[in-house]
Image (cartoon, rainbow, N blue to C red):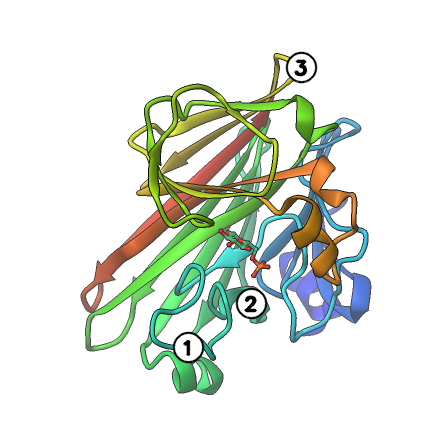
Amino acid sequence: MDIQQLNKQFAIPSKLFFEKGNGELTKVCLCRNDDYLEVYLHGAHITRYRQAANDLLWLSNQAEFTESKAIRGGIPLCWPWFGRKESFPELPQHGFARCSRFEVESTAEDDDGALIIKLYLNENNGTLSIWPYSFRLTLTIKLSDKLIVDLETNNTGEIPFSYSEAIHSYFSVEKIEKVELSGFTQSEYLDQLSHSTERQHNTIKFVGETDRIYKSSQQEFKILESGNPKISISQFNANSTVVWNPWISKARAMADFPDHGYREMVCIEAANTGKGITLFPGETHNIRQVIARY
Ligand code: BG6
């Protein structure tokens, strides 16, 4: 469907509409009071979430908007695997969803004025050639006084499959040196840099490259800056939370990441890692992240 057809079928006047975005890719804009959200059909990728004048998400000013790449920043979806696919190093890191074009299933405004859009991806020849399963992946975005991102996987085929996943949110911060994350105390984590298992004793602070998978039973976190809570994040049906900041040399090594960008962002990702989730034919599972500003 082109932009005109999408608007004809799904627009909600002055509140939800489709436009040509960067790189000629189609984006959807959601406007609710003073809040604004932008999502690209490419990857069902949320690139902006603004409350009043405040950007809650970080988007790289060097992000590339092209069908073959994931957009750097915002909320990419890692699916049907998180990280590298074990035994298949040639397959794309974090799966294929973030580089696939999603379709629009529906849009709505509920009785409380929340805007809702559902985007979906089904298997196709490209996905079947690297992951031989039939599925329907549905991203539901609900914009009320907070943002609810819900990723549902449905096994539409005749054999079971297992997958891992992450809602890979990049949050915007003023200065990473002043950031603390609460909600992780006493959680065990896998340090992806040293490959050791550690325990978090206090709030998380950033003094260098950080790449950790928290096997957390806790599901609510806060981003604090200079001791003040700024953003609250909660997650549902997630066995892990990934915390990532590339710091100086990794930032420099990424073409789509500004050298000083590491000071302005932190990723906190709701994830199902490790063995992930197994779905039998007809079964569904959903993971959710909820983002709100203090
Ligand atoms: C994080 C991983 O989720 O994503 C990191 O834990 C990885 O190891 C980061 O470097 C970014 O990945 P990518 O593929 O978007 O550069």
Q: In the structure shown, which secondary structural element does the residue marked by tag 2 occupy?
A: strand
Q: In which quarter of the image is ligand 1?
A: bottom right
| Quadrant hosting residue 4 | bottom right
- Give whichever of discs 1 and 2 has the lower sequence position: 2
Mark 1 residue type: Glu
Q: How many labels does the image show?
A: 3
Identify residue for label 3: 226
Q: In this view, does 248 lie to the left or right of 130?
A: right
Mark 3 residue type: Ser
Q: Which mark is residue 123?
A: 1
Q: Nearer the viewer, residue 20 or 109?
A: 20
- Residue plotted at (18% across, 65% down): 280
- Give whichever of discs 2 and 3 has the lower sequence position: 2
Q: Nearer the viewer, residue 208 or 175?
A: 208
- Residue plotted at (30% across, 55% down): 274
Query: In the picture shown, does residue 152 fall above or below 143?
Result: below
- Residue plotted at (39% across, 69% down): 85
In this rendering, which labeled residue sits more in front, label 2 or label 3? 3
Q: Which mark is residue 103?
A: 2
